[in-house]
Structures are given as structure tokens and as C-alpha cells.
């Protein structure tokens, strides 16, 4: 049987972890549309941010605490943090010793396809609760990561589908639709579009609001209500998302920082690490790994 092993590209060096902390954020070719993470954090704090994917984080030691939709949630050993796409949340240690976990980040289309088979659900699927106590699911997540590390494509794909199906059956359903159209929502969406277009050189809040004929505070309220964070926090999050895409494409971190509007590479480093959990350099090195098929 052939196994696929990861071979670092020439010159790649592992990132130096903070004392007592470690993290690896990577992809496995045979699990398209899914990011993988193993981490232990003690003092790390994650700023309010979003993911374009789902977050399925399985806690194996300690407790993670995170703000989610106006409340502070806690996930301990044997529990999972379940975050739907584009949902603002934070992250930090819930106990002094921190927390250790493994996580999978499946794209919405991956979860939707599994939901169609397991729940006969057509359309966007999601999780109803942000925390679920389910030790067997925690073990399944660990097995997915182990199979990916070992290059066992059949096991990694099978186990991933098993854990997503299990979680959907226990805590899944259709995502709520946000179809309420108000003048404030329209202005917030137009402001978001302008910030996306002018990401590298955004206007001040006052100029942005004046362009839509509203006061700065009215725009703040509308934007927070629509996107769960104020415009400046949303812009930082959007810059990190765009920087990830540039790093995936091989753009050096220093250049990516400037292209998305950060003042320099340390600025990108700070915000990237507090959102993704690893440095831009470590993230890009994992993306640069090549996979070779070798006989066993």
C-alpha cells in the first residue's frame, strides 16, 4: 500500500513556539476544503474574528473560554467548540493551565453535502449550540488528525465524515436565514463593500458615514448589528483572511502585509497570530510542504 508523507520544502524551518505553547495549522491534500490544527495554548488570546469555514475544536486538556453571540462559553475536556462560518468569536484559556485541542475546519460545502445525506437537509447546515459534550466525537477528531499525519487517506476521509455526521445528528440543523432588510443593514453592507475595495487605504469612520448620509455612530450601530463587530475590527479580520489567501499563493509575509493594508510585517504577525493561532511564516511553511507517494 502506498502512503503519502509530508516533506518540507528546502529551507523551511519550524517556528519557535512560545514557552509552554505549541501549534500546527496545516492541510492534507486528501481532505480538500478542510484545514487542520493541533495546539496547546496557555496565555494566548484570540481577538474577535470569524472563519469562512466551520470550526470543530475538540478539547483534550484544560478549558477554552470564548465569547459567542453575547455570552461567554466554556468547553472542557471531552467537549467541543462548534462555530458556524462567519460567526464572530474570541478565544482564551478558561483555567490557568490553558487548553489543548485538535480541530478541523471544514468548508461549508463539505458540511452541507454531509448534512444532505444524514439529515436530508437541503441548503445551508449549521450547529445549533456552540458547545457540545461528546467524548467519542473528541476521539474521532484526534483520529482524523492522526490519519492525516500518517498519510492514511481512506481513514482520514472516513473519520472526518463520521465525526461531522455525528455532530450534525446531535446538534445540527438548517442555519437561520438573515433576510431582514432594513435601511441600517443596507448601509452596513455598502460600507463593508467599500472597505473591501479600499482595504489597503480605508477612509475614516466619519468620511465613510458621510458618504452614506448618516452619522458615524449610526454607522457603528448598523455595522455592529449586521456583522457582530465594529468596522475597524471587521477590517482587521478581513485583512487577515486576505493575507491567508496571499500566503497560500506563495506571497512573502512582508509583501502580503503591505498589500492588505497592514503597516508592516510585525503588524500582520500580531493580528494573524491572534486570529489564526500560528505566525504567518509558520502558516506558509505548512502550505509549502509537498507530498510524495512512496511504497511501504
Image (tube, rainbow, N blue to C red):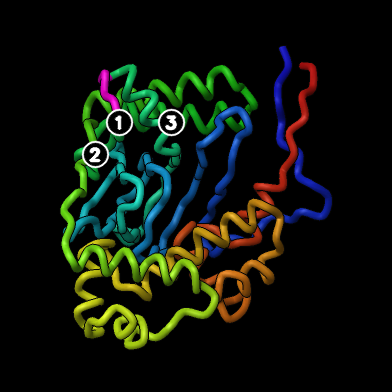
**Closer-to-camera residue (102/291):** 291
Residue 284 place in picture, x, y as percent: 66, 54
Mark number displayed over residue 123:
1
Give the Cα distance between marks 3 and 1.
Answer: 12 Å
Left or right of 288 in this view: 180? left
Q: How many marks on residues?
A: 3
Toward which corner of the image does residue 138 lie, by quadrant? top left
User: Which quadrant, please, contains the N terminus?
Assistant: top right
Question: Which segment did they paint magenta?
Answer: 119-123
Residue visible at 31% across and 40% down in the picture = 80
N-term-proximal mark, 1 vs 2: 1
Left or right of 37 in this view: 93? left
Mark number displayed over residue 175:
2
Query: Is residue 121 rendered magenta in the image?
Result: yes
Kindly state the secondary structure of the residue where label 2 is placed. Answer: loop
Mark 2 closeness class: few <14, some 14–19, many ≥20 residues within 10 Å = few
Give the Cα distance between marks 1 and 2.
Answer: 8 Å
Is the residue under label 2 in contact with that under label 1 (CB below 8 Å)?
A: yes
Relative to 262, residue 177 above or below: above
Left or right of 286 in this view: 50? left
Residue 250 place in picture, x, y as percent: 71, 55
N-term-proximal mark, 3 vs 2: 3
- Mark 1 vs mark 2, foreground winner is 1
Check disc 3 and report the residue beneath it. 110
Kindly state the secondary structure of the residue where label 1 is placed. Answer: loop
Query: Is residue 177 rendered magenta in the image?
Result: no
Amino acid at each position: 500500500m502506498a502512503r503519502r508523507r509530508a516533506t518540507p520544502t528546502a529551507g523551511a524551518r519550524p517556528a519557535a513556539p512560545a514557552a509552554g505553547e505549541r501549534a500546527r495549522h496545516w492541510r492534507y491534500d486528501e481532505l480538500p476544503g478542510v484545514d487542520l490544527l493541533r495546539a496547546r495554548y496557555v496565555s494566548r488570546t484570540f481577538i474577535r474574528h470569524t472563519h469562512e469555514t466551520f470550526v470543530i475544536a475538540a478539547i483534550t486538556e484544560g478549558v477554552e473560554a470564548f465569547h459567542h453571540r453575547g455570552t461567554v462559553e466554556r468547553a472542557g475536556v471531552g467537549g467541543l467548540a462548534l462555530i458556524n462560518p462567519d460567526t464572530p468569536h474570541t478565544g482564551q484559556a478558561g483555567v490557568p493551565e490553558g487548553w489543548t485541542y485538535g480541530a478541523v475546519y471544514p468548508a461549508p460545502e463539505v458540511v452541507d453535502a454531509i448534512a444532505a445525506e444524514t439529515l436530508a437537509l437541503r441548503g445551508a447546515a449549521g450547529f445549533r449550540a456552540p458547545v457540545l459534550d461528546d467524548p467519542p466525537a473528541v476521539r474521532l477528531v484526534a483520529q482524523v488528525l492522526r490519519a492525516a499525519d500518517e498519510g492514511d487517506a481512506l481513514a482520514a476521509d472516513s473519520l472526518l465524515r463520521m465525526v461531522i455526521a455525528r455532530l450534525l445528528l446531535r446538534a445540527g440543523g438548517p442555519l437561520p436565514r438573515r433576510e431582514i432588510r432594513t435601511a441600517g443593514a443596507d448601509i452596513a453592507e455598502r460600507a463593508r463593500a467599500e472597505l473591501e475595495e479600499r482595504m489597503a487605504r480605508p477612509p475614516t469612520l466619519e468620511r465613510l458615514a458621510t458618504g452614506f448620509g448618516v452619522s458615524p455612530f449610526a454607522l457603528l450601530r448598523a455595522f455592529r448589528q449586521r456583522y457582530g463587530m465594529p468596522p475597524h475590527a471587521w477590517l482587521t479580520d478581513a485583512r487577515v483572511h486576505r493575507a491567508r489567501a496571499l500566503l497560500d499563493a506563495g506571497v512573502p509575509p512582508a509583501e502580503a502585509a503591505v498589500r492588505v493594508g497592514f503597516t508592516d510585517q510585525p503588524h500582520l504577525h500580531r493580528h494573524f497570530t491572534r486570529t489564526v493561532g500560528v505566525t504567518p511564516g509558520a502558516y506558509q511553511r505548512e502550505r509549502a510542504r509537498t507530498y510524495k507517494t512512496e511504497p511501504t
